[in-house]
Image (cartoon, rainbow, N blue to C red):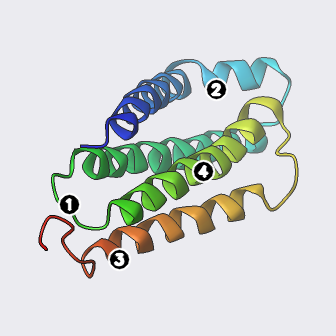
Amino acid sequence: MIRWIVFIAGLLGAIGVGIGAHAAHGLEEMLTNQGLAEADVLKRLSQCDVAVRYHLVHVVALLAIGNSTSRRAEASKGIAAFFMLLGIALFSGGLYSMVYFGKMGHWAIVPAGGLCLIIGWLSVANVAFSKDTTKP
């Protein structure tokens, strides 16, 4: 088990559930009170849904990586976790920024996050073809 991955997954899981709960129970009213048009409110609610979904799916993947007892490719597991964490931060974080603040920063943040998530999954796939480090 890679403890730091499990610890961070736990924290990110709590954050994702909190943001999801706010999106379900208060975000629409908050955005409406900001004077946004109905179409903009609906767009931001949809963006938040996507962000939370990707966020929580990748938290589960991080838990699987962190709890893996296989001694195969510890480096690949670390790389996968790193890119999934970066992907959550950029992809979901960029969308959260757009939803809550109306700004995303640079336009490439969300696509770069998506690319990081893809690299993370490819690193997971690489584990299947790695040597077992416990065998001589």
- Where is mark 2, residue-wise? 28
Question: Few, some or many C-alpha atoms within 10 Å of disc 1 (few <14, some 14-19, many ≥20)?
Answer: some
| Label 3: which secondary element | helix
- Where is mark 3, residue-wise? 126
Say which of marks 2 and 3 sits in front. 3
Q: Earlier in the sequence, mark 2 or mark 1?
A: 2
Q: Earlier in the sequence, mark 2 or mark 3?
A: 2
Task: Report the Cα–Cα distance between label 2 and label 4.
Answer: 28 Å
| Label 1: which secondary element | loop
Which residue does the image show at 42% across and 55% down from the upper left? 78
**Can the viewer see residue 91 in this picture?**
yes
Question: Few, some or many C-alpha atoms within 10 Å of disc 4 (few <14, some 14-19, many ≥20)?
Answer: many
Q: Amino acid at mark 4?
A: Leu
Q: Which image quadrant is residue 30 in?
A: top right
| Label 4: which secondary element | helix
- Where is mark 4, residue-wise? 86
- Where is mark 1, residue-wise? 71
Callout 1 touching callout 3 (CB < 8 Å) = no
Q: Amino acid at mark 2?
A: Glu
Task: Report the Cα–Cα distance between label 1 and label 4.
Answer: 24 Å
Image position, residue 11 (x, y; %): 44, 26
Say which of marks 2 and 4 sits in front. 4
Residue 40 vertical placement versus 118 (above, below): above
Say which of marks 2 and 1 sits in front. 1
Callout 1 touching callout 4 (CB < 8 Å) = no
Image position, residue 2 (x, y; %): 31, 43
Image position, residue 18 (x, y; %): 48, 22
Q: Amino acid at mark 1?
A: Arg
Callout 2 touching callout 4 (CB < 8 Å) = no
Task: Report the Cα–Cα distance between label 1 and label 3.
Answer: 13 Å
Q: Which image quadrant is residue 34 in?
A: top right
